[in-house]
Image (cartoon, rainbow, N blue to C red):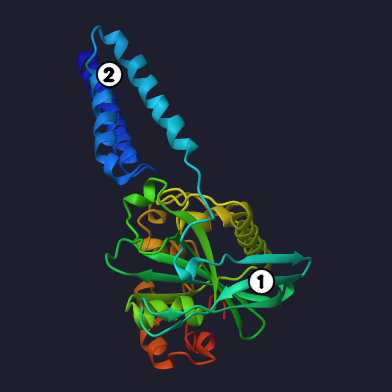
């Protein structure tokens, strides 16, 4: 029994160590090095770490491995994000907010005019909202491929017909494409796109042809207001100081949880926050959506693509994509 436990323990240690080697190789390969050097540098890092694990006597292995990995971590954490790159036009201008008690002025709300997914005219505007007029918070779930993974966005409604949508995204440079793998390795700066729904939502329904679901959330004005202010504080922090995007720790869904956690009773970790194509199911189970309908029926009703395509750039786009959607408690 003890021998089996020892073998199992050693196997686990080797799995962890080899996982560290794999992470290190990828971190160096995707790191901030000239492209021509990356393959050689990554291979060199892998060879050094593996070589350390083969040293004799065995007591020298872990100190040597730790020293090499420690140096890699020093380099890794020295990589600095930047607000000064050749950004794609749609993310070149950062939003900000001026918070004066109940009165909030939002700067650089994006409202691009699209002719295709990649052809658009960038436009921004400012507006002032009153926090006391916050009426609703809604969740968008966007599927672009696998049903396991989705992009999440929150939209905040002020008064009867004023909506502000926020999408947590990677801030890409000109010609840069998103890679889920690269998203783990300090390749993208983090950005909060503050935008009109005719931009953020219509881009996905009408031009990318992604499946977009809109869920009305159970509304608590105190919690909703606090979460909105948390979003704005992070927007201002990013305006002043850039941060790295991380596909695991600071993505579109885990960041929502981070903003809501101080103000909600049920912000516990759930596997569906990572495999976030099922985050609507999680929200339903926690009573955040309208539970008077079976979940499958609620999801069917929440697909907004047909009406968004019919509305196109209508001035009342935000109101009409919500027509007939179930509202918790109403």
**Residue found at x 29% / y 39%:** 37
In this rendering, does residue 292 appear at all?
no
Q: Where does the image place residue 87, in percent across and percent down from the top left?
A: 46, 63
- Among numbered discs 1 and 2, the one appearing first in the sequence: 2
Q: Residues within 10 Å of mark 1 (few under 14, many from 20)?
A: some
Q: Which residue is mark 1?
A: 106
Q: Which of the 4 image quadrants contains residue 33? A: top left
- Say which residue appears at 42% left-offset and 51% top-offset: 270
Which one is in front, 201 or 272? 201
Q: Secondary structure at mark 1?
A: strand
7 in relation to 227, above or below: above
Residue 269 in percent (x, y) is at 46, 49
Q: Is residue 301 visible?
A: yes
Residue 234, percent across and down?
61, 56
Q: Nearer the viewer, residue 32 or 110?
A: 32
Q: CA distance from mark 1 to mark 2?
A: 54 Å
Image quadrant in which the C terminus is located? bottom right
Q: Is residue 261 left or right of residue 199?
A: right
Q: Nearer the viewer, residue 197 or 37?
A: 37
């Amino acid at each position: 029994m003890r021998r089996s436990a020892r073998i199992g323990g050693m196997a686990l240690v080797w799995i962890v160590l080899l996982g560290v080697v794999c992470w290190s190789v990828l971190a160096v390969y995707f790191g901030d090095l000239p492209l021509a050097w990356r393959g050689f540098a990554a291979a060199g890092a892998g060879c050094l770490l593996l070589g350390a694990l083969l040293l004799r006597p065995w007591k020298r292995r872990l100190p040597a491995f730790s020293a090499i990995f420690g140096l890699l971590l020093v380099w890794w954490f020295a990589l600095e994000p930047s607000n000064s790159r050749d950004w794609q036009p749609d993310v070149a201008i950062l939003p900000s907010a001026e918070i004066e008690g109940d009165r909030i002025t939002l700067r650089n709300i994006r409202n691009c005019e699209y002719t295709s997914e990649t052809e658009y005219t960038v436009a921004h505007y400012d507006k002032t909202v009153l926090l006391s007029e916050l009426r609703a918070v809604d969740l968008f779930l966007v599927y672009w491929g696998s049903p396991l993974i989705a992009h999440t966005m929150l939209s905040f409604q002020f008064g009867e017909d004023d909506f502000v949508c926020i999408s947590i995204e990677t801030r890409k440079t000109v010609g840069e494409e998103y890679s889920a793998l690269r998203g783990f390795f300090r390749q993208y700066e983090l950005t909060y796109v503050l935008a009109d729904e005719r931009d953020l939502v219509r881009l996905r329904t009408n031009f990318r042809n992604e499946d977009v679901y809109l869920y009305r959330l159970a509304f608590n004005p105190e919690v909703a207001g606090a979460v909105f202010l948390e979003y704005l504080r992070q927007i201002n922090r990013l305006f002043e100081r850039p941060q790295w995007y991380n596909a695991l720790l600071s993505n579109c869904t885990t960041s929502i949880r981070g903003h809501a956690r101080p103000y909600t009773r049920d912000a516990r970790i759930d596997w569906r926050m990572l495999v976030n194509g099922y985050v609507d199911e999680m929200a339903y189970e926690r009573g955040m959506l309208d539970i008077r309908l079976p979940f499958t029926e609620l999801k069917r009703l929440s697909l907004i693509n047909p009406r968004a395509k019919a509305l196109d750039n209508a001035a009342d786009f935000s109101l009409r994509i919500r027509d007939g959607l179930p509202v918790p408690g109403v």
